[in-house]
Image (tube, rainbow, N blue to C red):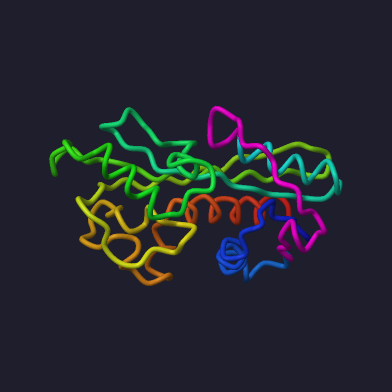
Amino acid sequence: MRIIFATHNHGKVEEIRKILKDLDVEIISADEAGISEDVIEDGKTFEENALKKARFINKKTKEWTMADDSGICVKALEGAPGIYSARWAGEGAPGEEWIRRLLSEMKNVPEGERDAWFETSAVLVAPDRKYWNFVGKVEGKITMEPRGVAHPRLPYDAIFIPKGYDKTFSEMSGEEKNALSHRGQAFRKLKEFLIKEILK
């Protein structure tokens, strides 16, 4: 079975290949499938954005496709930045700007009121366009300043401490983070679905 992952982020593709590595499934990126266009993510939810990306590739290829959309949601900011997480500091702004903007918005929020959560929707689309959505969520809090070195595409990891831990995602090993991350949760649910419903 082959699934085209609707992303141009090769780090993300490798992360998901690791999660699905023991299945008889080949994961290829949009680039590897010869698709270079980007989809405008104008949905109102993570699910809508993920579905839009997956269906765009599905329409072109008529193959199994999947996509995800993630973001960080801060309680004190009424759920912002949410679906705008990657564009909150302006289109094309570097990761440090994302962090700077979020910490600036929270400068008057005290230590005990900095609750936040990361959320991912992972969508799987069949050749007949039927789809399934798998959600992962991890709760935690926003630090007062960045800690650890964040991946350039995942800057919020440096300011997020998951509940029950004293390290930010950036201070954890890849294995440690994947074991509890929102994206890991969502794609492990997708994996279980593939095992039980599709690959049986």
Residue 168 shown left or right of residue 144 in the figure: right
Q: Write the start and end of the magenta stretch as one range.
A: 26-48
Dividing the picture into quadrants, the one containing residue 33 is bottom right
Q: In percent of the image, x 65 and y 40: which residue is there?
A: 132
Tell me: 189 left or right of 161: right
* Residue 95 appears in view: yes
**Residue 172 image offset from top left, x and y in percent:** 33, 68
Task: Please name whichever residue, 34 or 125, is drawn nearer the observer in this view of the structure.
Answer: 34
User: In the visual, does 139 lie left or right of 109?
Assistant: right
**What is the x, y in percent for residue 72?**
40, 43
Q: Which residue occupies the foreground of this view, 27 or 159?
A: 159
- Residue in front for this viewpoint, 4 or 106: 106
Quarter of the view holding residue 199 = bottom right
Residue at x 80%, y 44% (from the top left corner): 58
Main SS of residues in magenta: loop
Q: Position of residue 148 (x, y in %)?
A: 30, 66
The number of discs equals: 0
Q: Is residue 1 visible?
A: no
Q: Is residue 45 magenta?
A: yes
- Magenta span has 127? no
Occupied quadrant, residue 48: top right
* Left or right of 112 on screen, residue 155: right
Q: Residue at x 49, y 58 (%)?
A: 153
Relative image position of residue 131 (x, y in whole percent): 70, 38
- Frontmost residue, 145 versus 75: 145
Rendered-image quadrant of the C terminus: bottom right
Residue 55 against residue 93 in the figure, above or below? above
Image height check: is 104 above or below 16? Answer: above
Image quadrant occupied by the N terminus: bottom right
